[in-house]
Image: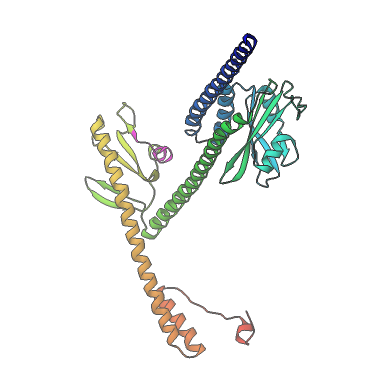
Amino acid sequence: MTNQISEILLNLEKRVAERTTDLEIARRQSDKRANQLLAIGEISKFVNSEQKVDTLLSLVTRLVSERFGFYHTGIFLLDDTKQYAILQAANSEGGQAMLRRGHKLRVGESGIVGYVAKSGEPRIALDVGLDAVYFNNPDLPITRSEMALPLKLRDEVIGILDVQSEKPGAFTEDDANTLNILADQIAIAIDNARLFSQTQTTLSEVQALYRQNLQEGWKTFSREEGMVGFNQSLSGGKKLTEPVGSAEIQQALNRGETMVIQPNGKSEEPAIVVPIKLRGQVIGVMRIKAPDQAKQWTTNEINLSEAVSERLSLALENARLIQESQRQVIKEQAISEITSKIGSSINLENVLQTAVEELGRSIPGSEVIIKLKEDNVNGGSA
């Protein structure tokens, strides 16, 4: 009986020790997972605020290595043909050498990165255990464990997060499941950065087109109106039909900044030259000359001139648009009237005569000639 009791106590102590060990392992795993999730949250906060793709990828590789203790972290992105995974960022020295060399791997054929790029499933490679792998990358000679995670966006693989450790058996399935959360966050951040870049590019193109149209519109308006500005003095005002050339006016047009010329005892006259800007585009300039050679311009006068210039740009643009609209209406009416008269003719000669007469009436002083191709007259095709 004593022996039996001793054996029971021994078994209980063994079971308590095993249970204690299991609890300690579970606690460590729980702490590890909690630390990983905390690190993922910190990394996500940083990467989601970055709007440039190149800066974002470099930031990710650095933060992942620092927070998780991986000696190498790399990010591959698939090319447009989905045939190659191209290394875009890496934190280690070996990774930097691979970047300079333009390192890329064929999808589905080269290592676990190629496998993950094709399958879209995480993959772990270790140099221990039944499925031991030999790592032979000369740029990363101390690698003993590697894990590749897919960067997926709407179920489509856009890249791979590749992490490597110098420790054997460094990664587990739990690590893959946890870091997959980070991979999803990285994929979203990359997509957001790309969309932001595309939006900026489109916005720049639209702004450039707007500036071009605005300049062309004002050139056409000045040519049709026969004036390039207006001059007002104490003796009266008059239209300007020729540009006024001066160094300060040209400088204000080129720089788009207000120029204040104070008296300096030389030949220069005191003046304020203010560019007339419409949504950031210079469409003209306003020069105010002082009646007194000793005039000192005050801050209030300068601010007033700039405020008037701002209001003036809007008023000028509104007037130009109204005149363009009126001209368009007149043109459409003329086209409608000419079309109606041409359509009422019943034979070829009357159609041609009506078209010539109406065009000549609409464009006074012009000579109108209509010539038909001979093959058209003879019934052939144009």
Taking the view exactly as shown, the residue that stands out farthest to the left is: 234
Q: Is residue 219 above or below residue 325?
A: above
Image location (x, y in percent) of residue 121: 65, 39
Q: Please, which colouring scheme is shown?
A: rainbow
**Where is 276 relative to 372, above or below?**
above
Q: Residue drawn 48% across and 27% down?
A: 42
User: Residue at position x 63%, y 31% from top?
Assistant: 173
Q: Is residue 206 left or right of residue 20?
A: left
Whether residue 254 is in magenta: the answer is yes
Which quarter of the figure has residue 271? Answer: top left
Q: Is residue 299 left or right of residue 6?
A: left
Residue 178: x and y in percent read 56, 31
- Name, please, the residue furthest toward the front: 1
Numbered range of the magenta stretch: 250-259
Q: Position of residue 80 (x, y in %)?
A: 65, 46
Give the residue at the far top of this rendering: 2
Q: Is residue 229 left or right of residue 377?
A: left
Q: Quadrant of residue 162?
A: top right
Q: Which quadrant of the figure contains the C terminus?
A: bottom right
Question: Of 236 and 121, which appears nearest the observer?
Answer: 121
Residue 146, compared with residue 291, is above or below; it is above
Q: Residue furthest bottom?
A: 346
- In this view, the residue in front, 136 or 265, is 136
Per the picture, the main secondary structure of the magenta-coloured stretch is helix
The residue lying toward the viewer, choosing from 362 and 27, is 27
Tally of numbered tags: 0
Question: From what the image shows, is residue 37 above or below residue 214?
Answer: above
Picture quarter with the N terminus: top right
